[in-house]
Image: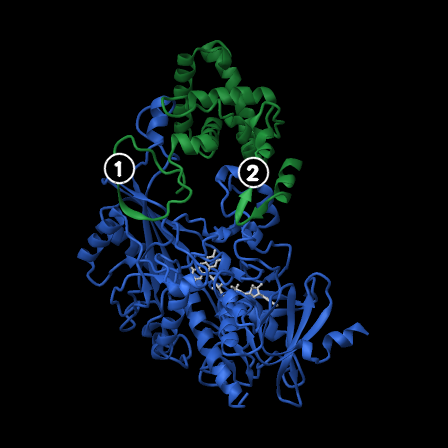
Chain colours: A blue, B green
Amino acid sequence: MTTNQNTEKTPNNTFDAIVIGSGISGSWAAKELCEKGLKTLVLERGRDVKHIGDYPTAFSNPWDFPHRLHETQQMRAENPVVSRCYAFDESTEHFFVKDTEQPYIQEKPFDWIRGYQVGGKSLIWARQTQRWSKYEFENPARDKYAIQWPIGYEDIADWYTYIEKFVGISGNKDGLETLPDGDFLPPWEMNVVEREIQQDILKKYPDRQFIIGRCAHLTEPKEIHKAQGRGQCQARNLCYRGCPYGAYFSANASTLPRAEQTGNLTLKADSVVHSILYDDKEKKAVGVKVIDRLTKEVRHYYAKIIFVNAATENTNLILLNSTSKRFPNGLGNDNGLLGKYIAFHNYRGSLTATRPGNQDSYYFGRRPTAIMLPNFRNVQEQDTDFLGGYMTFYTATRKGWNREVEGEQIGAVFKEKISQPGEWSVYMMMQGETIPKQENHIRLSTDKVDDWGMPQLIASVDYDENDEKILHDFFVEGEAMLTAAGCENIQRGDSRQAPGLDIHVMGGVRMGKNPKTSLLNQWNQLHHCPNVFVTDGACMTSTGVQNPSLTYMALTARAANYAVEELKAGRI
Amino acid sequence: MKRRNALKNITVAVGGSLVLPATLFSSCQSDDYQPLFFTKKDLVLLNEMGETILPETSDSPGAKVLKIANFMDVYVADCYKAEQQKIIQEGLIKFQKDCQEKVEKSFLKMTTLEKHEWLVVLDKSARDSETTHYFRLLKSLVLLSYFTAKDGATKALRYLPIPGKFEGNYPFQQGDKAWALG
Ligand SMILES: Cc1cc2nc3c(=O)[nH]c(=O)nc-3n(C[C@H](O)[C@H](O)[C@H](O)COP(=O)(O)OP(=O)(O)OC[C@H]3O[C@@H](n4cnc5c(N)ncnc54)[C@H](O)[C@@H]3O)c2cc1C
């Protein structure tokens, strides 16, 4: 029987470590484990995507696409969920999971945006990278809206540096306590109007210093980046198609090739991890069960340690689906909290405005980042009527041809006018913290399965009063700041977008000191199954206000290095 | 439809760059373009309206030689909602009737000046209209089709696929073109 060959432990299917998922966090786990000498198997459910060779649209012009990058009715009808993601279009659709591919159940509206391929969402992320500050680690417990983090900023600071060096993060050393500086490559520039707005706001609000965004782009590659075969950012801003210059961080351009170089990596694409195998006698996890994406064949793989990096929703799904006599409710789930305390980022609010003047000034190139303001609410103490905080972002650009002009709007003169840039317009948006709550959860369907026999995911996540208050605060403060900066025609926009579309979904397997109230310890090990590590967004105790992936990477590298030590010491 | 499926299948990457045989797009550029939504006669009319809105000027071609109606047709067929398609379809009929009633000849028979003056009037009423006026849709289709076409983007605007750097204080003089890519 082939089944036995595929599931029995043999030298061929046995490794030191297994990593589930090859995206931002999984590729970091793979790199660290491989570099430390562990024979590592990375299991990826999606197809293989080779750096450069599999970026078919990287050099295409807008007119090369049948609809010049505009959405068709058919695309929207077939993909109501993924087509709501701003980065999904004719040039990028091959890196996104289509709605029909893997159905799930929205008990409450939830947009699940997925990228299933080698490299995961590292190919399609927006690459904004800010460190957490001590306030994100400490304030949730101080203000009693989350359990205490088992680690603080000082535990992770060096790991941030370690990641930043390898990834390449551009940024300015701004010396702000609320957004600690890192090991930066040269920063991007603000344009003239962005700079004026920044100065105007600072005059009126001395504690609100907007800074140039920090992002994972090589503004000036160093040896460590050149050794990865990566080059300088060309300011094309076509990043979501995959970067043929390797100028932004993706697993495909950076961590996976590095892991491969060690000779210790085995990467298997098209391998859908179904569950983690727990051995009641050995009292630990011994391997994983995989369904071949194409043939649906079942295979088992074995290893001493397992890293779960399938991205928040799938990591929860895999753990919930990993049942055994010891863990009838999912791996490590003695307290019944697995899948609960899901939180996300509140992106609902935006403001648009115009700003008169500066007609003699323009910009050159397309910068891959925005102007950022660290959180200024409830920082030193709880000083508003809501919990948590938010970051604010803005950009200023000159209007293009799609605008009204003075005088006749037909003919040669009109054409000349709209061929030139128009007045400056300003776009401002928020990125708000949401509160982890027990009722916001993910669970498994008891009767519906997907094509691979996996139970379907049920998402039950919603906004609450606190999110409305944060949204309102952003509108009021954002308007006040734009007004102080001389802006006009300020207009509010509430996208009312469903949770999930932020693509910063976190929690469900949270870290904590107490096994009664958390799933993972301070090293991202399952309290009750310590040879399993969870280091993607699922581990997050609270969401912070920063873009999260840099923190996932730092937590992953930290946990992987700890895992190797523990393994060598024979403790796991 | 077939044309577009074929397109998907031949997207082959060679060393990271997309190689699309030029012949592939010739069907939508040449006169044997088979419309998906409009009639061939409509396309002639739309190209002519396009030329009136965005005529040839000293440094860039007009809408007509770019055959902007072909992409307008693809866009209306594939990207428009049914209610927008209806507005456009009924609008084109009304447009032709209004030409006869208000200018007393068909649009194609008007002089360049007559076309211009008539569309200025129509554009004004479209912008004042509280409901979605067909001409507002048509005009935005003309602009979209023109400025995203190769010649529109590279000649009427400045198209810079690989800037190589970003500068936040780049001098601008009256008359300089806008960048084609935001
Ligand atoms: C448009 C967009 C913009 C974004 N912008 C930013 C930003 O600016 N800054 C930021 O910090 N973050 C951003 N993000 C979020 C960022 O992409 C994620 O936080 C990050 O990719 C998470 O890393 P991960 O390793 O957990 O998941 P992923 O990168 O998604 O990787 C998970 C991998 O696991 C695989 N997998 C899933 N299930 C299984 C299974 N059962 N078996 C085997 N493999 C499996 C998936 O196929 C995938 O390859 C953005 C995301 C998107 C889509």
| Relative side of A316 to A1, left or right | left
Task: Please tell me whether residue A551 is drawn above or below residue A229 in the rendered image.
Answer: below
Give me the residue at 55% from left, 59% from top. Answer: A114
Quadrant placement of the N terminus of chain A: bottom right
Give me the residue at 31% from left, 36% from top. Answer: A422
| Relative side of A323 to A25, left or right | right
Task: Please tell me whether residue A545 is drawn above or below residue A420 in the rendered image.
Answer: below
Residue A30 location in percent, x, y?
Answer: 53, 72
Residue A21 location in percent, x, y?
Answer: 56, 68
Mark 2 Cα within 10 Å, few/some/many (few <14, many 20+)? some
The amino acid beneath tag 1 is: Phe
Q: Which chain carries label 1?
A: B
Check disc 2 and report its element: helix, strand or loop.
loop
Q: Distance between the residues labelled 1 and 2?
A: 33 Å
Tally of numbered discs: 2
The amino acid beneath tag 2 is: Pro
Q: Is residue A304 visible?
A: yes
Q: Mark 2 lies on which chain?
A: A
Question: Which of the pair A60/A409 is nearer the observer?
Answer: A60
Q: Can residue A140 be seen in this view?
A: no
State which quadrant residue A281 falls in.
Answer: bottom right
Question: Which of the pair A112/A549 is nearer the observer?
Answer: A549
